[in-house]
Image (cartoon, rainbow, N blue to C red):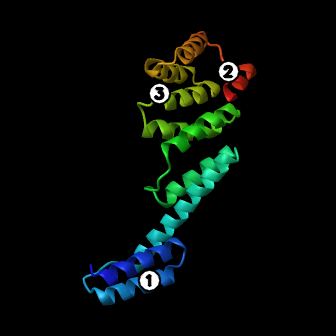
């Protein structure tokens, strides 16, 4: 692609990301005048980049809601971003933080989809499995919680954390929820 045409296409994509479909289509048309080998559907390309822009703004919104401890809203924003652009980048750490912090704020049922997403992206990560284990325990899935805590126990070098999770697993096996208000308060700190 000719240098000038490349610049025009990039400018068009940027306009589309900022919701200016007409401006984008115009830039794509000018690019094609510079390089007649350019052959793509201008309107479709513009719409694709409009969605990318909206998805990126939804991720920013999700990050902002996460910082504000508005976990349901954060999850909704991330989910909306993925619907607009399935390839949009939402860091695993955002999903994991949403899972852990939301669970500690007694919103485990609401944030469980974030936990599942984090584990799907990093199934071997013991810390992420630990977060999902908490959410699972708080939503009554004791068997799933046991599996997640055992994955964490197998990976951690921290003797105190390991002992704590082993106590949780023992309670869960006995059908007892170890996550009392006092335990949750300790975990928040």
Residue 166 placement (x, y as % from top left): 55, 12
Give the secondary structure at mark 3.
Answer: helix
Residue depicted at 32% across the width and 90% down the height = 33
Closer to the chain start, of discs 2 and 1, is 1
- Give me the disc on residue 137: none
Relative side of 31 to 159, left or right: left
Dot 3 or dot 2, earlier in sequence: 3
Mark 2 vs mark 1, CA separation in Å: 56 Å
Q: Which residue is mark 1?
A: 25
Position of the N terminus, as image quadrant, is bottom left
Q: Which mark is residue 126?
A: 3
Q: Are marks 3 and 2 in contact (CB under 8 Å)?
A: no
Q: Is residue 53 above or below residue 59?
A: below
What residue occupies the far right of the structure in this picture?
A: 181
User: What's the residue at 61%, 11% (across, down)?
Assistant: 171
| Lower sequence index among marks 3 and 1 | 1
Single out the residue that lies furthest toward the bottom: 33
- On screen, 83 above or below 188? below
Residue underneath mark 2: 179
**Spatial CA span between label 3 and label 2:** 19 Å
Judge depth for marks 3 and 1 and give the one in front. Answer: 3
């Amino acid at each position: 692609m000719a240098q000038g045409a490349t610049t025009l296409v990039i400018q068009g994509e940027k306009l589309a990301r900022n919701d200016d479909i007409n401006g984008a289509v115009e830039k794509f048309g000018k690019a094609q005048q510079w390089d007649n080998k350019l052959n793509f559907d201008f309107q479709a390309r513009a719409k694709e980049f409009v969605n990318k822009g909206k998805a990126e703004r939804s991720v920013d919104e999700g990050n902002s809601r996460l910082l504000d401890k508005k976990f349901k809203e954060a999850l909704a924003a991330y989910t909306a971003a993925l619907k607009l652009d399935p390839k949009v980048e939402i860091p695993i750490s955002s999903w994991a933080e949403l899972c852990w912090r939301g669970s500690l704020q007694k919103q485990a049922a609401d944030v469980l989809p974030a936990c599942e997403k984090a584990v799907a992206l990093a199934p071997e990560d013991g810390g992420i499995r630990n977060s999902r284990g908490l959410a699972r325990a708080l939503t009554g899935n004791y068997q799933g919680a046991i599996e997640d805590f055992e994955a964490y126990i197998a990976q951690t070098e921290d003797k105190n954390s390991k002992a704590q999770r082993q106590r949780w697993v023992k309670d869960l096996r006995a059908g007892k929820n170890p996550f009392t208000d006092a335990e949750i308060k300790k975990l928040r700190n």
